[in-house]
DNA sequence: CGACATTTTGATGAAGATCAAACTGGGTGG
DNA sequence: CCACCCAGTTTGATCTTCATCAAAATGTCG
């Protein structure tokens, strides 16, 4: 029994219980845990699919480059998230994925994923589920960037990360890791680094956050959420069991 | 043999050939063609899933509302597109869908979709495929709205619609239907109606487009695409057979 | 014709980009 | 151990793009 398979299976069971046959199949196909340094490319736009990565520890981001070299982050990949499912079907990546912090992930080959999807409809259904949640988050980012002013936009992002880290046990009170530079935040929110800094300053002066050493504390999540018009429905957390046992150790 | 099933099947075969057994199953499950007037709600945010709609004719859009009543369009649904696949898995809609023009669509119930997905892995794979392409488009919108100025942003949208309508035979030269008001364009591009108008004016003055009676002509698609930094890769058109026979009649 | 949606134009203001430069802190090499 | 370097953060000043407000013009449909 490999630890990586265990974390994968528990993740799957967040959306539906698996039979022992299904669990077996996942264990057989689940590859070894990979470790990667921060700021390394996990997959580049245009790459053929190698398989899916299940993030065990660390943050990554999805991004697309523009012709002029600027980049837009199009999603955050947090522990428990699965990436590159889509590339297994589409055969090549339409965006890049890069680690933000050091990362541990287990890999399933493209062949394994397609086999699992074809033979185990419920596994396939679970993969659908993860993918759709992610898609829903992308749409929420679109709304966020399209229609909210800088302050609200950033508040919304902070609320989202906070809500997403909670079910995987990676928050301590209202404090959590946020291994993004201000420049990264700018790429995520479509703001200049300078403006990111100014908004952060304002949040600090208003006593809403503390951000130091990649650690963010939300001193008043309710107010922040209200200002941002944050409604967690789009995260589809409702069908998760509350605080499931995860691989990540609590301090 | 129903015409609606035929258009659905041909759509599926764009990404992989189906066995006669699979085609049969699709025909059995495919519901009647529904007609809907322009500006009607096909599904609202929060609605339980009823099934998937395969658009035969007309335009629709996906949108999300903000707390203050403004709305952001998060995607365009064109003839041949399938909508609400995700809701069948997630059980409820996380965004609304509204017709822009009069619409004809065939419906498959949620139960049918889940049954087809579980029993026919290749049908499931095709549904994955459509969904992922759509997701890729959403990411492209995110980049577009996040990082491009108004003119380039609108040019990019026009290029996208042009490219998406081509394989389904709905372009006449470089002219095609665009049943969106300037206010709709504003919702799609996260611009005010006034600014949409100004950008359109500039495009006209530069001889790049003609837009009259919901008909858009791109007089110089190459230039427009170059200005917008348009790269059609994200549409994943490459695996489509060229100009497949579609239900839509050519004039 | 008259009501209503949509398009067009003008004037003004605000949010945020950009440019420039100083400051901070951790890591490295001499 | 200190000097230096470099990535990241902070601050100021200026400029652009686009939103907003207001109103006229145009078109559409009963």
Image (cartoon, coloured by chain):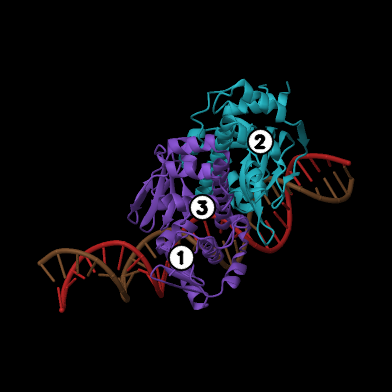
Chain colours: A purple, B cyan, C brown, D red
Quadrant hosting residue A221: bottom right
* Near-viewer residue (B57 or B225): B57
Badge 2: residue crowd in 10 Å (few <14, some 14–19, many ≥20): some
| Rendered position, A220 above or below B99 | below
Residue B202: where, in percent of width, then height?
56, 44
The residue at which mark 2 appears reads as B115
**Chain containing mark 2:** B
**Chain containing mark 1:** A
Residue A34: where, in percent of width, then height?
35, 50
Camera-near label (2 vs 1) is 2
The residue at which mark 1 appears reads as A196
Verify CB contact (< 8 Å) between mark 3 and mark 2: no
Q: CA distance from mark 3 to mark 2?
A: 24 Å
The residue at which mark 3 appears reads as A11
Label 3, secondary structure: give it.
helix
**Chain containing mark 3:** A
* Near-viewer residue (A47 or B169): A47
């Amino acid at each position: 029994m490999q630890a990586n398979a265990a974390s994968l299976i528990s993740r799957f069971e967040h959306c539906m219980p698996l039979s022992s046959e299904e669990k077996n199949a996942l264990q057989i196909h689940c590859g070894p845990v990979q470790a990667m340094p921060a700021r390394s490319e996990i997959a580049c736009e245009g790459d053929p699919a190698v398989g899916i990565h299940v993030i065990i520890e660390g943050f990554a981001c999805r991004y697309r480059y523009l012709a002029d070299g600027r980049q837009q982050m199009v999603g955050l990949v947090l522990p428990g998230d699965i990436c590159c499912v889509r590339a297994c079907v589409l055969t090549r990546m339409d965006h890049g994925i890069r680690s933000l912090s050091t990362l541990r992930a287990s890999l399933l080959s493209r062949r394994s994923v397609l086999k699992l999807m074809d033979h185990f409809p419920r596994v396939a259904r679970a993969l659908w589920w993860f993918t759709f949640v992610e898609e829903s988050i992308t749409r929420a980012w679109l709304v966020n960037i399209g229609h909210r002013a800088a302050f609200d936009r950033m508040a919304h992002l902070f609320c989202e990360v906070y809500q997403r880290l909670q079910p995987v046990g990676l928050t301590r009170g209202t404090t959590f890791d946020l291994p993004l530079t201000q420049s990264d935040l700018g790429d995520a929110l479509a703001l200049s680094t300078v403006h990111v800094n100014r908004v952060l300053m304002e949040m600090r002066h208003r006593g809403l956050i503390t951000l130091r050493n990649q650690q963010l504390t939300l001193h008043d999540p309710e107010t922040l959420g209200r200002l941002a018009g944050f409604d967690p429905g789009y995260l589809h957390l409702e069908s998760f069991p509350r605080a499931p046992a995860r691989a990540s150790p609590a301090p």
